[in-house]
Image (tube, rainbow, N blue to C red):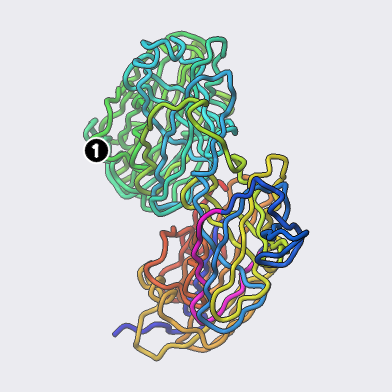
Amino acid sequence: MKRLFRKIAKSILITLFILLIFSATMLSSPLPVFADSVTDSYADTSKINTGASSGYGVTGGQLKINWYDIAWPNRRPVTVTNSGSALTDYQTLITLDTSSLIASWYNSSWQYRKKITVTSANELLSNYQVLISVDTSSLIGAGKMKNDCSDIRFTDQNPTNLIPFWVESGCGTAATYIWVRVPHLPVGGQSVPIYMYYGNSIATSTSSISSTFISNTIFHGTGAGASVDSHAGGDTYRQTGFSSTPSYVTTIDDGTGADSFFRRYRYLFVPASTASYGFGVNSDDGSEVALFPLDGYGGGWYTAHPFGAHDVIATWYGGHGTGTCGTSGTPGSRTLTAGQGYWLDYVMGETSGGQYAQMCINDGSGYKTVNTTNFSGKLYTRMYTEGAEPTSSVGIEETEAGLGTSKMKPDCSDIRATDANNTLLNYWLEEGCNTTSTKIWVKVPSLLNGNTTIYIYYGNSAASSVSSITNTFLNNSIFHATGANASGTYNPVDNHTEADFVKGNMVPSSTSYVTQINDTSGADYFFRRYRFLFAPSSSNFYWFSANDDDDGEATFFPQDGYGGGLNTTHPYGAHNIIAFDYGSGGAGGCGTGGTRYRYLV
């Protein structure tokens, strides 16, 4: 049998529960579960008592149901079952279907829409550019869409909230390719709806590269390889995974690296004028650059075969051939249209000796190295997953008249939670508004052993959101658990499977709430686990890193793996690793030791 822990701080398991620090209350017994029942809806306010105790009461000789506030015409009773000891101020996770309650429309000037279901990969994704294919030929032919597709609009799962998009190609065909920046995609193959509106004859185009993609940035990855001495060699590396975490850079001009490796750069080039543009490469060893429609969408970091047609426009095949970019190797040229985006894919491979990777473009004023100084505002890139990318399916056409009456605001901001005494309860809507799986944390003041009924109210069009992380969870607090395991039972956490074993099976001997993750104390053969909610103040790129001795990992964990209390009972929902340091005795600097990842959140 492997040993579980060998030295001080053998394993630091960090669970980042979704993306200031907050923590939920933890307990060792199974967590409370809920069951929802039929929705109550009382439009006849004469049958309602407001501000009264639970159940029914008699007012003026009439039997009336007690109600929180007549401004909220609908409610849903939710039964929370606690099979353990009594709990106080416990954060209980409930799941509701809000999609059946929302029937909102973006703007009455648009006659039609189609619901597009986006299914995520096994990563938590924010502001991810999803490629969808829509048949606009039939819509234009039926007179429902403008000939130039300029009346297309997209909203996220809130049908009134516009989101950025870019029509790359194919307007008026059965395969119109559109990139849509989706604000949030949960992990684990869950689906969220977005909506494509059309049918406004006076609308002008809002298709935008700059709003949809990341400006002045180039995607870069590297891995083990050899020289690129043919196009087949270049395609081999397009299918090859990276040996280290990819990064976003501002130039293709790099002379560093060891032997036997490759580099790959991917970006969207947007020319300022319609003209013939020259492309060149300069490398040691070989390299090529290709125009790659749709950026080979589907495989994330690598481009899985079979991928779409691509056009090699400049090459240097062979050995040590560095010289002058634009004259070395075989340069090429293509006529490009102003304002249209062109995906470019540069691959360089090195066997031994010197190392160099460079690409240049001639925009009419001579060859210049590709970087954000020479081509400011003309270089863009996108987010990439480590594996399979989100997929989409286009639904049937809908009209505003066919939706019926909406019972809930499209952003779920009218939700209120109360106990049986009509007292408002604090809650936080984690994700999934307008889906069949809306995740809501409710802080319930008292949960005795057995059943407790709480109520979810909705239907007030004038209400503003009171969803609150700070009011629902413990502020500036991190949950910490530690425990021991006998020598030889398990190895240090050398991989994700072993980390999951600890999360699901190791029973802590002590728990506490702490204010930092930075601990060098402890004896041999033990583990630590930290769980907290990270709430960034702004949307940005964030690096996540783990530094430990022996081993550890950090993961995004939607809903905090709710259900098992101190342990995370298998099977639990999908989660994705955001940093790890596998291997014994490897403690270094946090941010430099192990493998770190950068996420846009």
Helix, strand or loop at label 1? It is loop
Q: Looking at the image, can residue 106 be seen? A: yes
Callout 1: 10 Å neighbours few (<14), some, many (20+)? few
Q: Residue at x 50, y 12 (%)?
A: 338
Residue 13 location in percent, x, y? 49, 72
- What residue is rendered at 27% in x and 30% in y? 317
**Where is residue 138 drawn, in percent x and y?**
34, 16
The x and y percentages for residue 201 are: 53, 10
* Relative depth, front residue between 474 and 448: 448
For the record, the magenta segment spans: 22-39
**Front position in the image: 354 or 110:** 110
Q: Is residue 348 left or right of residue 592?
A: left
> Does residue 432 sit above or below 93 in this rendering?
above
Q: Quadrant of the N terminus?
A: bottom left
* Magenta span dominant secondary structure: loop
From the viewer's perspective, is 229 left or right of 277?
Answer: left
Outermost residue toward the front?
A: 61
Q: Amino acid at mark 1?
A: His
Residue 491, placed above or below residue 533: below
- Residue 452 lies in the magenta stretch: no
**Residue with the mark numbered 1:** 305
**Residue at point 65% right, 75% down?**
446
Q: Position of residue 528 (x, y in %)?
A: 52, 78
Residue 282 seen in the figure:
no
